[in-house]
Image (tube, grey):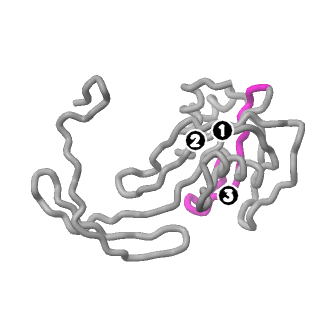
Amino acid sequence: MINKSGDYTKLKKWQLLKTSEEYKTKFFNIEKRSYKLPNGKVVDDYYHINRPNYVLVVAVNSKGEILIERNYRRGVDDFVSEIPAGWIDENESPLDAGIRELSEETGYRGEAVLLGEIYAQPGYMNQKAYVIYVKVDETQKPEIKREEDEDIEIEFINPKILDEMISKNEFKDMGALSAIAMYDKINIQ
């Protein structure tokens, strides 16, 4: 049960007993973890993924349209509609990362506001996504500097059309859906 202050009154944290690295790349590492559960049982084979944090950018133009990207995603072997996103570099703030990623992928810039953060997959991964809102400055469009594996189409879409895409299950990216829902609830202009 959650009390009025938002505290969980009956839940207890698991106790981490040990970790061992099982696999490592420049993009993530996998650890095998041993935990003592609140009931006293010890479980030795929970696998945990460590990934860098990233930003999700809700970029909006002067008409209130949201900037959408379309590109091929190898994980699902399909073309996916999403919003600008990318890793937060070491010693970089989420706001700076959001502005950088938006500029690199789309050429657009603007002032950024942090809307909040979400957990990507909290059951087995530590990664956080920071949701950034950017009111796009349409008067300046610097050169796009995409990575070699970024073949992206961009388009500003009216929120009503985006809602239709979502209701028809044509817009499926979990991070983008979460970020857009956060933007809709906060209703920043």
Choose top left, top right, bottom left or bottom right for residue 166. Answer: top right
Q: Is residue 154 above or below residue 61?
A: below
Indicate the quadrant containing the C terminus: top left, top right, bottom left or bottom right.
Answer: top right
Confirm whether the magenta stretch covers residue 77: yes
Q: Earlier in the sequence, mark 3 or mark 2?
A: 3
Q: Residue at x 38, y 50 (%)?
A: 122
Q: Earlier in the sequence, mark 2 or mark 1?
A: 1
Residues at discs 2 and 1 in contact (Cβ within 8 Å) = yes
Residues at discs 1 and 3 in contact (Cβ within 8 Å) = no
Label ID, residue 72: 3
Q: Badge 2, how many Cα within 10 Å: few under 14, some, many 20+?
A: many
Residue named by callout 1: 58
Q: Residue at x 88, y 42 (%)?
A: 140
Q: Is residue 34 above or below residue 162?
A: below
Residue 86: percent from left, percent from top: 63, 55
Residue type of the residue flagged with mark 3: Tyr
